[in-house]
Amino acid sequence: MFSGERERTEGGSVGAPGTAEPRFIVIGRILRPHGVRGEVLVEVITDFPERFDVLEVAYLGYDNWHATPYRVRTRRRHRAWTLLSFEGYPDRTSVEALRDMFVQIPIEEAQPLPEGTYYVHELMGLDVFTTKGEEIGRISDVLFTAANDVYVVQGARGEILLPAISQVVKQIDLAAGRVVVELLPGLLE
């Protein structure tokens, strides 16, 4: 699983297994080489795409727990994507090895979020209860869909998908480690 830096109620970051606070935030994913001069096409996975304009060092890795620093040589926007090149990677053949790696930044460089918005790592592991006090389970993942984000909750009833919308999510209390939801008809069926 990976999650990206987002501004809405999902946010995103990843860290070493078993750690509460992640080391890195995913801001993009390398899709493929672009051209013959060592550029890669990056899918932007952040609500702060301007951060690519000043990116000096990107931390690249496949599994979100082991990232290696790469010095950015050039950066430019290309339609909905970003093109990056790295020092020591002068041509298409050399950057082929970077395909599908996540582009990450240290957690310390994460943008502060407005009140009521969260990074994914803040939501992961929160216990989910109904407004009537019934425990549903624990957030295990956040899915990013076109309409809205979806919290994946693992519990006694198996996997439950809860839309992250105001009609469902009534309260998120990070200090208490819990989310309170109002179940719409059919959500548990």
Image (spheres, rainbow, N blue to C red):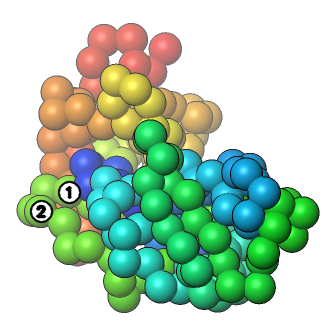
- Residue 21, x across and y down, in percent: 45, 82
Q: Can you tell which quarter of the image residue 117 is in?
A: bottom left
Nearest to the observer: residue 139 or residue 136: 139
> What residue is pinned by disc 2?
114
Q: Residues within 10 Å of mark 2 (few under 14, many from 20)?
A: few
Q: Is 67 on the left-hand or right-hand side of 46?
A: right
At 74% from the left edge and 66% from the top edge, which residue is drawn? Answer: 38
Numbered circle sitting on residue 132: none
Image mark count: 2
Position of 111 relative to 88 (above/below): above
The one nearer the camera, 189 or 40, is 40
In the image, 174 versus 5, the foreground residue is 5
| Residue 66, image x, y percentages | 72, 81
Q: Position of residue 179 (x, y in %)?
A: 28, 51
Q: Are marks 1 and 2 in contact (CB under 8 Å)?
A: yes
* Badge 1 amino acid: Thr
- Residue 115 on image: x %, y %: 9, 62
Residue at image point 35% right, 83% down: 109
* Residue hosting label 1: 117
Residue at point 61%, 34% (across, down): 158
| Residue that appears at 27% across and 18% down | 184
Residue 23 seen in the figure: no
In terms of secondary structure, where does tag 1 sit? loop
Q: Is residue 159 above or below residue 129?
A: above
Using residue 120 as the reference point, say whether residue 118 is left or right of it.
Answer: left
Around disc 1, counting alpha carbons within 10 Å, would you say few (fewer than 14), some (14 to 19), or many (20 or more)?
some
Tell me the kind of residue under disc 2. Answer: Pro
Residue 88 located left or right of residue 116: right
State the residue lying farthest toward the right: 93
